[in-house]
Image (cartoon, helix red, strand yellow):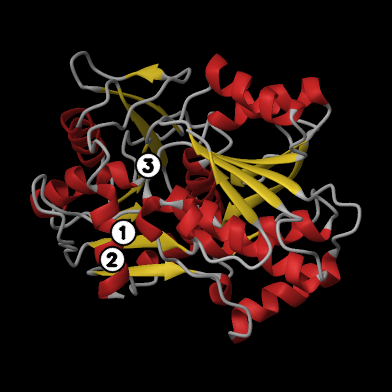
C-alpha cells in the first residue's frame, strides 16, 4: 500500500493542485463567500451532509454527479439535510472558503471528489477536527510535500481504475473490435491507470481469442485537460476516419467531444466514471467507478459510528468498487456470462490488472498481441 501511494503521489506532482471550480445553475451564497451552492430545504437552516464540487458541474455525468448521487441517496433515505457547494474559482483558497461555508452551515461530514482537494483537505482536517471528511481519488498533503497526512477525521478513497479499464478493453475486443483508441484528459494517476488497464484488458481478450500479434491496435493520447474542445473533437474524428472503431474517452468533458465525433462518423465510444449511456447513442459501455455506492457506504459507516478515518482504501472488484453497466451496455457478442466470469477472476485473483504507471508511458505496458501507438 505504501509503495502504491508513493507512486500515485509522485505522479500527481506534475499536475497543478489548484483547480477545483466549475459551472452550473446554482443559488448564489453570500457575497465574497468564494462559493455557490444548491441544497435541500431545511426549516432550521442547517445542512448535515455537504459536497464540494471539483472541476465540472454537479450534473457532469461523471465524478461530481456520481458522488452527489450517493450522498443524496443516503440523505433522502434517512431524512438528513444536505447541500453542495461550488467554488467560484480554481484555487485552493476558494475550495477552503467553500469548506468553511459548509461547516458554518452545519456540516458534520463533507465529501470532496477529486485529488485536487488534497491540499485544502490537509488544512481543513486540522482546522475542523470535529468534522469528518471523505476525499475521493486523493490523500491530504502539504503544498510542498506530497507525503500523505491523513488525520483521524478523514477517509481517503481510491479506486482500482486499472480493473475498470481492463474490463472495458476486454469487452471491446471480445465484442469484435480490433482498432481501439484511448483519449485521456490529464495524465494524472487515475486516468493513466484507466488507460493502462484498457490496454491490458484488450491484450488479455486478444490472447483468449487466439489473435495474431499486432492484430489489435490501440491509439493512445492525453488531451492535457478535462474540457470539451474543437481540437479534441477534430482529433477523434480523424481517428475514426482512419479506421478506429471505438474510443475510450477518459477525461470528463473530453467525452462530449469524442461523442460528437462518433455521432458524425457512426462509430462507438466507451464512457468513464459513471454510466454515460444516456449521453449519446454512441456509448457502447462505460468503465465505472462505483462512486455512488462508495460515498453512500462511507456515509453509512459514519452514522453507524464506524467511520474509517485516518486511512486510505482502494476499492476494487472484491468490494464492487468498479464495474461495467451491463444493463445499458450495447454489446453484440460480449454478454453477462462473459462479464461475470472475468469479474470473478478479479475477485478470486486468477485475473490480474497491473496498477503500475510505467512512467506514464503507454508503450511500456507489457503486451503480447496488442500494438500500442502513442500520439501527441
Residue 208 is labelled as: none
Residue farthest toward the front in the current orientation of the protein: 213
Left or right of 272? Residue 11 is left
Classed neighbour count for the residue bearing mark 2: other residues with Cα under 10 Å, few (<14), some (14–19), many (≥20) = some
The residue that appears at 74% across and 41% down in the rendered structure is 246
* Label 1 or label 3, whichever comes before in sequence order: 1
Q: Residue at x 47, y 39 (%)?
A: 64
Vertical comparison of 57 with 30: above or below = below
Which part of the image, by quadrant, shows the N terminus? bottom left
Q: Residue at x 70, y 23 (%)?
A: 261
In percent of the image, x 46 and y 48: which residue is there? Answer: 191
Q: Nearer the viewer, mark 2 or mark 3?
A: 2
Residue 43 picture location, percent across and down: 39, 34
Q: Is residue 216 visible?
A: yes
Q: Which residue is mark 1?
A: 8
Residue, disc 2: 5
Query: Which of the two marks, 1 or 3, is nearer to us in this view?
Result: 1
Q: Kindly check if marks 1 and 3 are in contact, taking CB atoms under 8 A apart as contact.
A: no
Q: Position of residue 262 (x, y in %)?
A: 74, 28
Amino acid at each position: 500500500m505504501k509503495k502504491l501511494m508513493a507512486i500515485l503521489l509522485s505522479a500527481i506532482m506534475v499536475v497543478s493542485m489548484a483547480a477545483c471550480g466549475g459551472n452550473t445553475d446554482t443559488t448564489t451564497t453570500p457575497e465574497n463567500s468564494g462559493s455557490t451552492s444548491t441544497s435541500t430545504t431545511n426549516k432550521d437552516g442547517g445542512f448535515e451532509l455537504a459536497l464540494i464540487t471539483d472541476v465540472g458541474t454537479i450534473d457532469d455525468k461523471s465524478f461530481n454527479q456520481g458522488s452527489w448521487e450517493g450522498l443524496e441517496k443516503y440523505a433522502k433515505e434517512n431524512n438528513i439535510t444536505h447541500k453542495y457547494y461550488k467554488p467560484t474559482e480554481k484555487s485552493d483558497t476558494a475550495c477552503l472558503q467553500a469548506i468553511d461555508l459548509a461547516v458554518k452551515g452545519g456540516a458534520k461530514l463533507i465529501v470532496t471528489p477529486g485529488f485536487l482537494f488534497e491540499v485544502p483537505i490537509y488544512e481543513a482536517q486540522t482546522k475542523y477536527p470535529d468534522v469528518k471528511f471523505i476525499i475521493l481519488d486523493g490523500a491530504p498533503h502539504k503544498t510542498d510535500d506530497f507525503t500523505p497526512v491523513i488525520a483521524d477525521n478523514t477517509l481517503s478513497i481510491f479506486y482500482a481504475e486499472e480493473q475498470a479499464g481492463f474490463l472495458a478493453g476486454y469487452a471491446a475486443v471480445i465484442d469484435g473490435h480490433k482498432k481501439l483508441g484511448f483519449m485521456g484528459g490529464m495524465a494524472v494517476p487515475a486516468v493513466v491507470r484507466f488507460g493502462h488497464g484498457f490496454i491490458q484488458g484488450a491484450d488479455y481478450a486478444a490472447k483468449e481469442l487466439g489473435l495474431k500479434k499486432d492484430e489489435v491496435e490501440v491509439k493512445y493520447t492525453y488531451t492535457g485537460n478535462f474540457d470539451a474542445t474543437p481540437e479534441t473533437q477534430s482529433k477523434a474524428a480523424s481517428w475514426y476516419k482512419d479506421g478506429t472503431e471505438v474510443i475510450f474517452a477518459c477525461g470528463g468533458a473530453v467525452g462530449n467531444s469524442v461523442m460528437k465525433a462518433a455521432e458524425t462518423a457512426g462509430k462507438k465510444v466507451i464512457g468513464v466514471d459513471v454510466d454515460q449511456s444516456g449521453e449519446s447513442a454512441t456509448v457502447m459501455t462505460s468503465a465505472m467507478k462505483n462512486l455512488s455506492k462508495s460515498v453512500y457506504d462511507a456515509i453509512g459507516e459514519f452514522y453507524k459510528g464506524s467511520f474509517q478515518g485516518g486511512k486510505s482504501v482502494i476499492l476494487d472488484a472484491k468490494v464492487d468498487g468498479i464495474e461495467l453497466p451491463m444493463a445499458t451496455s450495447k454489446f453484440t457478442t460480449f454478454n453477462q456470462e462473459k462479464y461475470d466470469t472475468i469479474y470473478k477472476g478479479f475477485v478470486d485473483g486468477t485475473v490480474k490488472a497491473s496498477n503500475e504507471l510505467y512512467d506514464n508511458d503507454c508503450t511500456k505496458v507489457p503486451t503480447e498481441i496488442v500494438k500500442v501507438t502513442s500520439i501527441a
